[in-house]
Image (cartoon, rainbow, N blue to C red):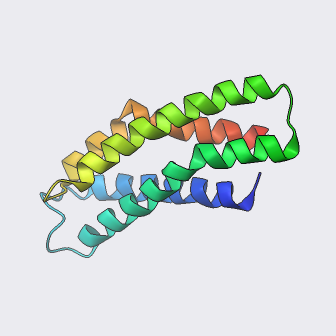
Amino acid sequence: MSAEILDHGNTVEECYEFMLAYAAQGRPSDQGSKSGPQIREFLQRAAIAIAALAEGCSKVVKDQRLEPAEKYSAFIAVLDRDAHDSLAAIDLVLAQPSISSQLVDNLNASVHLRALLTDMFLMSEILP
């Protein structure tokens, strides 16, 4: 798998792990704590990485001439949909004036984000 895709995947995983810790803190807001500004930074970095995942995977499939190409393309379309759905949820959270632990806990529980993480893990095992 390309280093770029691995970096994107690591960024998303790190964000998810930070969100788990942030959710456990029971904070009513992201204001007034060290981890408050960090949650926004992690989410912003994850959003950038998520936006590039499907294109990066498509590039690997094309460059490596992986076959059957239509099977890869079909799954990359799933990954792309899950990425777009996850981005919508992350963008909604980032648009809030205050990010509470409960809000992040609900984002963690989102089926969209969990599906994307599973898609990423699957692709990391398949792509060379």
x, y percent for residue 35 = 28, 70
Q: Could one spot residue 72 in this view of the protein?
A: yes
Q: Could one spot residue 128 in this view of the protein?
A: no
x, y percent for residue 41 = 36, 67
Give the total of numbered labels. 0
Eyeballing the image, is 65 above or below 16? above
x, y percent for residue 98 = 14, 59
Residue at 30%, 49% (x, y): give it.
91
Q: Is residue 14 left or right of residue 76?
A: left
Eyeballing the image, is 7 above or below 70? below
Residue at 69%, 39% (x, y): give it.
123
In this orientation, which residue lies closer to the viewer: 77 or 14?
Answer: 77
Residue at 65%, 28% (x, y): give it.
75
Eyeballing the image, is 114 above or below 19? above
x, y percent for residue 92 = 25, 46
Q: Is residue 48 left or right of residue 110?
A: right
Q: Is residue 42 left or right of residue 49?
A: left
> In which quadrant of the rendered view does residue 58 lie?
top right
Residue at 35%, 35% (x, y): give it.
110
Eyeballing the image, is 9 above or below 39? above
> In which quadrant of the rendered view does residue 7 lie?
bottom right
> In which quadrant of the rendered view does residue 45 lie?
bottom left
